[in-house]
Image (cartoon, rainbow, N blue to C red):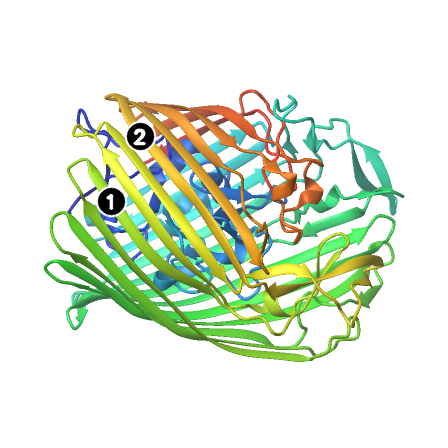
Amino acid sequence: MKKYIFYITVALPILGWAQTPKDTIITELNEVVVSTKVPKNYEKLPNQVEVITAKQIDFQNFQSTAEVLSNSGSLFVQKSQQGAGSPAIRGFEASRVLLLVDGVRMNNLIFRAGHLQNIVTVDESILDNVGIFYGPSSTLFGSDALGGTVAMTTKRAKFLSEVKNKFTGGVATRYSSSNEEKSVSFNLNFATSNFASFTSLAYNDFGDLKMGKRKNHNGDFFGERPFYVATISGVDQLMVNDDKYVQKNSGYKQYNFMQKLAYKTNSGFEHGLNLQFSTSSNVPRYDRLTDPSSSNGLRNAEWYYGPQQRVLAIYSLTKNNAFLGSNMKANFAYQNAQESRHNRRFGNYNLQHREENVNMYSASLDLTKKFSKSELFYGFESYFETLKSSAYAKNVNTGVQTDLDTRYPNDDNNMMRNDFYVSYNHTISKKTFWNAGGRVGYTTLKSTIADDTFFSLPFNSISQGNLTYSGALGIVHNASNNVMLKANLSSGFRAPNIDDLAKVFESVPGTLIVPNEDLKPEKTVTADLGFVIKSDSKRFKLENTYFYTRLYDAIVTAPSTYNGLNTVIYDGSPSAVFANQNKGKAFITGLSTNVTIAVLDNFHFNAGFNYTLGRVVENGNQSPLDHISPYFGKIGFLYNQKSVNLEAYMLYNGKKALSDYSSSGEDNLAYAPATGMPAWETYNFKAGFTVIEGGTLFAGVENILDTQYRTFSSGINAPGRNIYAGLKYTF
């Protein structure tokens, strides 16, 4: 089996986990594949790509995939509740960042532009790696990849030639003090020469999250929970919280299952079946539970998401040299995503239920052709998605059920995407590589309203068809043995979905978003310039990437009118009218810097810094673009021996000044201090010890100083001091 050597410059102090030769900080990865659409040697790619491996995820011991990403220092993650995580890349978030699981899109026709929680439905314990593609990657992956793509690849079913025994597997447990987390996962691989099976089960129990008790030296105390609502004998009551640092009613449970089967035929075909299921208990929408009320103290008595259910089934067929000398992989997939919202005001005993059921059907064909000095990637993708939106209200005391307006149009809703793509990578010489690619497709959307009794609209159907396209061109040049130069020009697109065009939605109290049937796709063009400097001994490496993005026909939530009125009564309260609009142009610019130093053979220093600036440009005036995080990064040290791994690191985040908040409401100023979100930093320590053969003990302390803080645009405080311990045994 071949081995590939990569120089990974991610800002992760776990870099160097594998035992490396003396005087080197190279990480050896045994055929880590984050996508079948790019070369395995990422140094030949002109765009910024970073990888988080399974070994890193195991050592870090974070509670969810959202925590894995947010603590990497590589991207920013927003949270409205504990059971959430909305990744932001280069100032783009939610429906402008593409999420992939085993090459299949998670993004669907109701992915919203605000903040999402879908990524927590992917169990971190089943991940083989996470690839983060920065900048527009629509050419490779399609619509929505404006800011970038998070490509999550799960563990494979391994054949007997890849493992020591027919049966291999492991079990892992973990306890965390900040939310009294109790987690356990189990996996089993069965292997023969031509058949393999991989099974994974995981359970997580997250209690109410405790925030830090010590004042952030950059700000004041904020976000404490002195009161909460309890319903006693059918009557809502405002209760005093025994511990104001415990974020009452933020806990939930998570259940995950995965089954993979693989079969090799004598003719060279490999058949694969990939089944994934994830669900949860009800997940409290914590930020809404803290909305104040002048009359009752708190506005809402109940606000929670129903079980977040995700079903994914993929049948895959692969064969080398299958078509015109090309390696082939065909995927046929089905997904079902169910999400629901349940809420009622304090003293109002009619609990509102809004339920969404999404089905996605997809087929893709990916082909790879290798030449002596180049590689050609090309293929086709097709996705068809449907939505059923329903709603009702039910009195929690009497059980009487009444009709209610739906979140989305209550009749037929569907989208279809069909795309062709091609990407060509060529080696000009030992020093120079270049890449070019393109994608073209057509997207249709149809949505009809069967009943508009609750909120009459000027239309009862929406139908759109959009031609979509993107391209990329880049070059990598090794100016010397110590200096590498990179340049890349790429475009991206995002076709409006049902959530953009057709919903009636209260984003924050007092702000109502109404449909706009005239939306067009938004598009980006990004230029990347980067360099890598490394020493001859490979003990030092500096990577820097600067980018500049122009966003055209940006879909921005802005003030609007409804029937000539800029304020209407919605859900019993006056609300200012907003609508999604193509607000001309916007720009985003920034830089990312990472440095790695091998201080000693087994002692490494790593540091990362990320900065982003975004502005909407309209009539010669500039205003803040939403979802632009303050500067952030990670600095740390790692010590690793064969049986001992230690890490000490600092996560840090800059201040988000009041003047930098967007007026759209998506930055959630209502859940921030009056002067904006202060800067913060946390200090953390982690350890892993091999105690017996196959057995590893993990332990650590996060937020050692117990600092009280909240990340930008989030609606819940971050964990306070968290002491955790876990044991993993593999056989």
Q: Earlier in the sequence, mark 1 or mark 2?
A: 1
> Residue 503's quadrant in the figure?
bottom right
> Which quarter of the picture shows residue 686?
top left
Identify the residue at horizontal 37%, vertical 72% (top origin): 440
* CA neighbours of label 2 inside 10 A, class few (<14), some (14 to 19), many (20+): many
Q: Position of residue 77 (x, y in %)?
A: 52, 43
Residue 126, percent across and down? 40, 46
The local secondary structure at tag 2 comes to strand
Q: Which residue is tagged 1? A: 485
CA separation, marks 1 and 2?
Answer: 18 Å
Residue 714 visible in the displayed image: no
Q: Check disc 1 and give the amino acid type.
A: Leu
Q: Is residue 44 left or right of residue 658?
A: left
Q: Residue at x 28, y 41 (%)?
A: 531
Please say if 227 is above or below 161: above
Residue placed at 72% from the left, 31% from the top? 224
Residue plotted at (48% across, 24% down): 684
Amino acid on which disc 2 is placed: Thr
Q: Nearer the viewer, mark 1 or mark 2?
A: 1
User: Closer to the camera, 645 or 555?
Assistant: 555
Number of numbered discs? 2
Numbered tag placed on residue 596 in the rendering: 2
Q: Are marks 1 and 2 in contact (CB under 8 Å)?
A: no
